[in-house]
Every structure is written in structure tokens, then in C-alpha cells.
Image: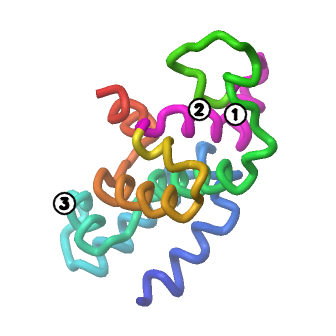
Amino acid sequence: MVYYSYFHSIITYGLIFWGNSHCSSITFRLQKINIRIIVGIRGRDSCTEHFKRLKILPLQSQYILSLLLFVINNRGCFMVNSKMHDINTRTKSNLHRPISNLSAYQKGTYCSGIKVFNSVPSQIKALSHNRNQFKSALKIFVYFHSFYTLDEYFGCNKN
């Protein structure tokens, strides 16, 4: 309860805007320090299982969840591949990624949201038209895997 009142509310404020920046690693270290204090383990012990046991999302998992909920809540701002062309492809339900050479734009909320949404497992993506079902299925998925990095998330969905 103390974690959620003091720390969680601060790190989730505006997370979709700063969660992909280089400063997020410092915040993640602070989150792990808080978990270690709550559980009472040493500084070198792994926190992975403790995140799952306490039902607290690591920073990157919280970023993924927040970003996907942003995409679902603002679905009208995103274009689906099937609206771009009439060809029946296996990526027709994915969101269309705009072409850009600017890394600041590619790391921004819009492009990151598209990339993360396109990597969601297909059974969860099929629920995207019903916000409540999508949110509950996504929470189960993210809590189960407890991702430490975005690369871990993208690698999990390829398997």
C-alpha cells in the first residue's frame, strides 16, 4: 500500500512520454530498490519473482500497458493496414507505421505505440474492439511475463 501511494503514482505520471527515454533506467533502479526494501532482500538478489509475487509491474511493463491503453483509447488517430490497401495480408490487422527518419519521432508516443501494438499476441489483439476485455487480457499477459525491457517484450511475442 505504501509503494502504490508514494512511488507508483509518481512513476506512472506521464509514463507514455518518458518511458522510452534514457532516464527510465534510473527510475527502474529506484523501483527495484523499493521492491528490495519492501521484501527485505539484499542488493544483488533478483527482483523478478518478487515483482510477480507482489503484483507490481516493472517500469517497462507498466510503460507497455500504458502505451497500449493509450492506443486503444485513441484508436481513431491510428490507421489500420487494411484501410491503406485492399490486399489481404497477414498484417492487415496491424496499425500502419508512418515512414520517418527522425529518431525523436520514432521513439515518440505515436510510433512506439504502433510498434508495441503490432507486437501484441493475436488473441489479445482480437479483443481490441472491446476496451474492457482487451485491458483485462493485456494485464494478465503483462503481469505473467513481467517484462524488464522492451526487447524482452518483442522477443516474447516472436516465439
Q: Quadrant of the C terminus?
A: top left
Q: Is residue 133 magenta?
A: no
The location of residue 84, given as percent across then percent down, is 76, 19
Q: Nearer the viewer, residue 95 or 126?
A: 126
Range of residues picked out in magenta: 96-122
CB within 8 Å, label 1 to label 2: yes
The location of residue 130, given as percent across then percent down, is 58, 57
Disc 1 vs disc 3: which is toward the camera?
A: 1
For label 1, count other residues whose C-alpha is less than 10 Å away and answer few (under 14), some (14-19) or many (20+): many
Looking at the picture, the colour scheme in use is rainbow
Dot placed on the residue nearer the N-terminal end, 1 or 3 = 3
Classify mark 3: helix, strand or loop: loop
Classify mark 2: helix, strand or loop: helix
The location of residue 60, given as percent across then percent down, is 47, 51
Disc number for residue 45: 3
Q: Nearer the viewer, residue 135 or 21?
A: 135
Q: Which residue is mark 2?
A: 115
Q: Nearer the viewer, residue 111 or 101?
A: 111
Calculate the distance from the C-alpha at mark 1 to the C-alpha at mark 3.
Answer: 35 Å
Query: Left or right of 55: which side holds 58?
Result: right
Calculate the distance from the C-alpha at mark 1 to the C-alpha at mark 2.
Answer: 6 Å
Label 1 is placed on what type of residue? Cys
Dot placed on the residue nearer the N-terminal end, 2 or 3 = 3
Disc number for residue 126: none
Vertical side of 10 occupied by 151: above or below: above
Label 2 is placed on what type of residue? Lys
Disc number for residue 111: 1
For label 2, count other residues whose C-alpha is less than 10 Å away and answer few (under 14), some (14-19) or many (20+): some
Residue at (78, 19) in percent of width and height = 100
Residue at (36, 60) in percent of width and height = 140
Label 3 is placed on what type of residue? Asp
Query: Left or right of 1: which side holds 5?
Result: right
